[in-house]
Amino acid sequence: MPRSILVIDPHADFYKQKLQAHFPQLEVKTAHSTAEASPLVPDVEVFAGMPRSYSDDLVREAKRLKWIQVFTTGTDHITSMPSLKPDTLVTSTRGMHGPQMAEMALMLMLALARDLPRMVRNQQSASWDRFQQRRLYGKMVLILGVGIIGEELAVRCKALGMRVIGVSSAPRAVPGFDRLLPRSALLRSAGEADFLVVLVPADPSTDKIVNHALLRAMKPSAYLVNIARGAVCDEQALIAALREKRIAGAGLDVFQVEPLPADNPLWRMQNVIITSHQGGQCDVYNDLVLEVFRKNIECFLEGRVSDMVNLVPH
């Protein structure tokens, strides 16, 4: 029997076409939703798709499952599943999101500093309203989490004339940063920042790392940008800080509950810009995924597991 792959994704047909052309020996099954995937899983050896495409039930039903290729960086939803066997391989597409995530962070920084929402409201009401603008030039950005995305963002911020400080669990020399600090210096450095951009992964050490204490340490003129994970931010503490104007505003792409419920007060705050967890998306996303996935399939078929890209321990 040929190796069987199940791609669960709205663009599953794209992946099937490309993979079948490159690996004719593969059986590539497709599903466009979790519900559609359920009857296809019993004989499948490989799952592929976004983390939320999978449920623990699907993993439990896939008796022959050997490998899960996740189409994004975060894999905590997969690795925390009770039914995931210790010997099931998990790989991510870590490394392909840097440019678009950095652009998203920069877009939110510019939109907050220039008060783009106010401009849009003025256009909608045909109101000629000239108001003072903040510039990024000369401002200090504190990047919490110095990985691939942080490196991409640092270079872009330096190009705009900003001072760039990084806070990392493992400080080291990184291009684009004026200085790298340990996490123990987070509260002190937050008090100097004009922008705090959060890029840390979600793990026990970062759970609600953006909390009352950190928000109190920030300047009233400073902005928070979170494009990491919803779990790293204490949402109630942030809502209180925004209401009390203890910080100037926030740009948020990720939330504790997604989709963000319609009754969440963040939707109606004029000093908040909300995007729908789309920082990693871009017009060539499928092509970038395919590049990683195809290499991993080659390694998998040839038994070179140690050569697979972005193997995730669990």
Image (cartoon, rainbow, N blue to C red):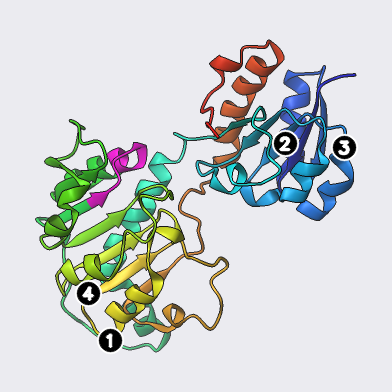
Q: Residues within 10 Å of mark 1 (few under 14, many from 20)?
A: few
Is residue 160 visible in the rendered image? The answer is no
Q: What secondary structure is marked by label 2?
A: strand
Residue 128: numbered disc = 1
Residue 47: numbered disc = 2
**Is 72 part of what is drawn in magenta?**
no
Say what amino acid the circle numbered 1 marks.
Trp
Circle 3 is placed at which residue position? Answer: 42
Say what amino acid the circle numbered 2 marks.
Phe
Residue 247: numbered disc = 4
> Is residue 19 rendered to the left or right of residue 232?
right
Q: Answer above or below: position of 298 versus 18.
A: above
Is there a contact, CB below 8 Å, between mark 4 and mark 2?
A: no
Say what amino acid the circle numbered 3 marks.
Pro
Q: Answer above or below: position of 119 versus 67.
A: below
Say what amino acid the circle numbered 4 marks.
Ile
Is there a contact, CB below 8 Å, between mark 4 and mark 3?
A: no
Q: Quadrant of residue 135?
A: bottom left
The residue drawn where x is 12% and y is 41% is 179
Residue 2 point in image, percent of width and height: 86, 19
Which numbered disc, 3 or 1, marks the residue that appears first in the sequence?
3
